[in-house]
Amino acid sequence: MAEVKGQEMAVKTEDRTPQEQQKLRPVVVTPPVDIYELEDGVVLFADMPGVPKENLDVQVDKNVLTIKGEIGDIVPKDITPLYVEFNGKAYERAFTLGPDVDVSKIEATMNAGVLKIFLPKSEEVKPKKIEVKVE
């Protein structure tokens, strides 16, 4: 394959060898995330464009939060691509949760390819305001 200043040049799909075609098989992509701590919990935003709700799986098992999503078909199956830069078909990422997360109250929503997961703090670890009485 030709190189230009250390970067790979685009090659049409049909010009690839069988070994190169094998490398083009879909891979699992780690979605980028942003995590914010709030007073009552933690919010996680994961970028998972192309994943429809029915192909999304969010679960907690033994204090491990796992998010998985399979990208829906963008191009009909009977069309052969001429050029492919992104061959990921699925996203997957896991996070170990601390004991201060109330796993029974976790909420997840999806909007415009961004998965939002709210991980509420358990009542025991939430800050408590103490009322001061005047005597």
Image (spheres, rainbow, N blue to C red):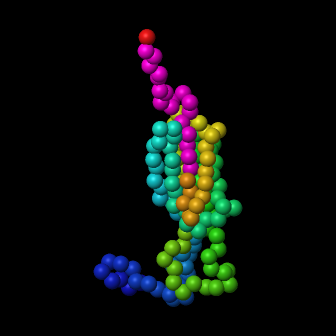
Where's residue 123, x and y in %? 56, 30
- The structure residue drawn at horizontal position 51% and vertical position 54%, both measured from the top left corner, is 45
Quarter of the picture containing the C terminus is top left
| Residue 91 to residue 26: above or below | above
Instruction: Give, as a single range, the part of the protein colored magenta.
Output: 117-134
- Expressed as whole percent of the image width and height from the top left, the position of residue 32 reads 47, 58
Let me know if residue 126 is in the magenta part.
Answer: yes
Can residue 79 be seen here? The reply is: yes
Query: Residue 131's x, y, as percent?
Result: 47, 22
Residue at x 39% of width, y 80% of height: 8
Count of marks, rendered view: 0
- Nearest the camera: 4 or 91? 91
Asked if one can make out residue 28 in the rendered structure from this viewpoint, the answer is: no
Residue 38 painted magenta: no
- Pick the residue in front: 70 or 110: 110
What residue lies at 59% left-to-right and 68% top-to-bottom? 50
Q: Residue at x 47, y 42 (%)?
A: 38
**Which of these two is toward me, 59 or 131?**
131
